[in-house]
Image (cartoon, grey):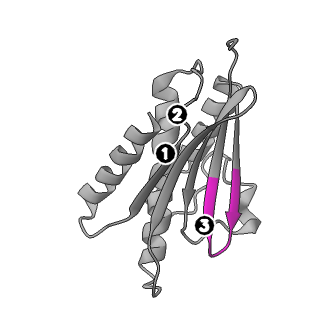
Amino acid sequence: MADEYLRLAYHGLRAKDSSFNATMETHFDPDLPLVSVIPQDIGRVLLNLISNAFYAVNERAKQKIEGYSPTVTVSSRKLENAIEITVQDNGNGIPEAIREKIFQPFFTTKPTGQGTGLGLSLAYDIVVKGHGGALKLESTKGEGSTFIITLINHSPQ
C-alpha cells in the first residue's frame, strides 16, 4: 500500500510540474504481520505524508544546491507488537520553533493557497484517534524530516 501511494504522489506532482524529479527509495520489511486498518484512511495519511515529502525536496531542489539529489524514502518494519512506517525526505527540515504546531488544524508552512493546514492534523487524528497508533516527527534543519507512523498489531501471531 505504501509503495502504491509513493508512486501515486510522485506522478501527481509530476503531472503538475513536469520538470520535477526525485529519487524514490523503498525499504519494506517482507515479514510484516497484517494490521487491522481502514485502508482508505491510512492511504490518505500516506498520500499526505509522501506528498509533503515531495514538496519539501522540490523546495530544496529550487535552491540549486550543488550535489543535492532530492530523495524520498518510504520504509516499513516489524516491531514487537506493532508495525512502523516511515516517510523520510532530504528537504530543508522543519524548524524547531514550529515542530510542535504542525499537527494542529489550519497550521501550514506552505505559501497562501498551497496548503490548507488540514493534512497533518487529519493524518494525526486518523493514526492516533482512529487507529490507536502514533505519529511522530523527527527533523533536522538542512537535512530533512522523517514522519513515523506506528500501528499496533492487535491480532495474535
- Please, which residue is most extreme toward the front here? 31
Q: Which amino acid type corresponds to the residue marked 3 in the rendered image?
A: Gly
Residue under the image location 58 percent in, 40 percent down: 76
Rendering quarter of residue 21: bottom left
Residue neighbourhood size for the residue with mark 2, other residues' Cα within 10 Å, grouped as few (<14), some (14–19), many (≥20): few
In the foreground, 126 or 64 = 64
Q: Position of residue 95 (x, y in %)?
A: 69, 69
Q: Please give the name of the residue rendered at 70% of the width and 11% of the height, measured from the top-left corner.
A: 156
**Which residue is label 3 attached to?**
144
Judging from the image, what secondary structure is the residue with disc 2 in? loop
Classify 10 Å Cα crowding around label 1: few (below 14), some (14-19), many (20 and above): some
Q: Quadrant of the N terminus?
A: top left
Tell me, yes or no, if residue 106 can be seen here: yes
Q: Nearer the viewer, mark 1 or mark 2?
A: 2
| Residue assigned mark 2 | 30
Q: Is residue 130 above or below residue 44?
A: above
Q: Is residue 57 above or below residue 66?
A: above
Rendered location of residue 112, percent (x, y): 47, 63
Residue 41 rendering spot, x and y as whole percentages: 51, 28
Q: Residue furthest top?
A: 156
Q: Earlier in the sequence, mark 2 or mark 3?
A: 2
Residue 142: x percent and y percent? 62, 76
Q: Are marks 2 and 3 in contact (CB under 8 Å)?
A: no
Circles 3 and 1: CB atoms closer than 8 Å: no
Q: Nearer the viewer, mark 3 or mark 1?
A: 3
Q: Secondary structure at mark 1?
A: helix
Q: Are marks 1 and 2 in contact (CB under 8 Å)?
A: no
User: Which residue position is annotated with label 1?
Assistant: 48
Q: Which residues are magenta?
A: 137-146
Label 1, label 2: how far apart the Cα atoms are: 24 Å
Q: Which of disc 1 and disc 3 is earlier in sequence?
A: 1
Asked which quadrant contains residue 133, the reply is top right
